[in-house]
Image: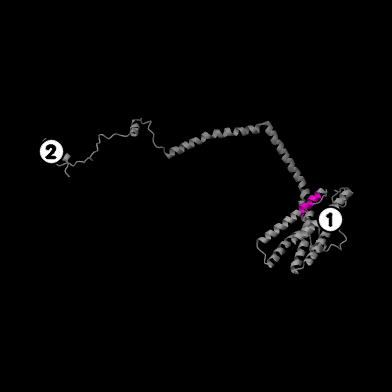
Amino acid sequence: MYNAFDSSRGNQGKQSNGNPYGQYGYNQPSVPQPVGQNYASHQPSVSQQQYQNEPFSQQTYPPQQPQQHQQQQQQFPQTAPQGGSQQQPFQNFFQDPSSAMGLQFSQTALNASQQYMQQNFNSIMHTQDIKYYFQVSNSYVVRKLGLILFPYRTKTWTRIYHNATPVGGPGSTGQEIYAPATEDINAPDLYIPLMSFLSYILVWSVFAGIHGDFHPELLGYAASKTLALQLLDLVLLKFCIYILSVDAKLWDLVAYSGYKFVAVLVILLIKNIFALQSRAANYSVYFVFAFSLGFFLMRSLRYVVLSTGIRAQQVNISQTKYRTNFLFVYSFVFQGLLVFFMT
């Protein structure tokens, strides 16, 4: 393409040196300039001028991550004194004489309550006597089951007790120590109530499966319902014993309230094995064993509620009357309702 700029320079070189190729002896190439662009007239922007006019020491550069990390590390030690200032009110609270007196009083009350519980825990729960209620034998279990189901022929219901030293003698503590179940058929135990409780749940589930109503949740339902009834029975018995001011061991009450599972289990077996369809037959079986259970409990609890031996001298006639009425209502009415509901 023809360039007017090259032609003018070439003519000048010709005129000045008389050489058509210029001063270097050859035609020198030239960089063409874009049309309409003037390099001399180009001016920097306002921000660039301000940046160029600033001194080198005042010019700012983009922040870098290492510098930020160092600044953060320098800031953490500065916040430590603030935490100490926040803890100062708490230190003043513990240094207050009234606060120290209140803390000392609460600590003294807590120590006194712990000491009281340690001294009276054995008298409330009698945990040291739990092994006593499982000292049973095969002959005792058979005879005890017969006594619960057919208690009418038994004439002796008093418990056999013995002491290390005679009551009232020198060195006597005045406490009646009863013989275990292996030596006394009238002694309460926890083996028969526990086994009858578990057997009742299993037998109920088996008969439910025979009738086609079994499902895995039935075991949990039967166990929870039976346990709830047993707790209700025990709470009511313990509350009435407390109202009547009777000194009875908790495990004795658990044993006597658990003997009802023997009657419930026998009624359930008879109704399902013999397939009693008649309502009269069902009620007859229920009344026979419910009455037997009530008779057994009234005879057995008589020596717990009415107090015998040394404690019988401390009970007046009116208290004996109230205790006898409670014994009848609990043994026949309340236990009869529980047996009817569970069968």
Q: Which residues are magenta?
A: 233-242
For the residue pair 272 and 191, the one nearer the viewer reads as: 272
Q: Amino acid at mark 1?
A: Phe
> Which residue in the structure is indicated by mark 2?
11
Q: How far from the left and from the top, in percent, is residue 90?
A: 62, 34
Circles 2 and 1 in contact, beta carbons < 8 Å: no
The residue at the point 72 percent across, 56 percent down is 227
Whether residue 191 is visible to the viewer of this picture, yes or no, is no
Residue 241 lies in the magenta stretch: yes
Q: Of all residues shown, which one is farthest toward the front?
A: 279
**Left or right of 28 on screen, residue 137:** right
Q: Quadrant of residue 132?
A: bottom right
Q: Quadrant of the C terminus?
A: bottom right
Q: CA distance from mark 2 to mark 1?
A: 146 Å
Q: How far from the left and from the top, in percent, is residue 107?
A: 71, 38
Q: How far from the left and from the top, in percent, is residue 161?
A: 85, 55
Q: Which mark is residue 328?
A: 1
Q: Amino acid at mark 2?
A: Asn
Whether residue 14 is visible to the viewer of this picture, yes or no, is yes
Magenta region's main secondary structure? helix
Disc 2 secondary structure class: helix
Disc 1 secondary structure class: helix
Residue 181 lies in the magenta stretch: no
Pointer 2 local density, CA inside 10 Å: few below 14, some 14–19, many at least 20? some
**Left or right of 343 on screen, residue 316:** right
Q: Which mark is residue 125?
A: none
User: According to the image, what is the colour scheme of the structure?
Assistant: one colour
Q: Quadrant of residue 268?
A: bottom right
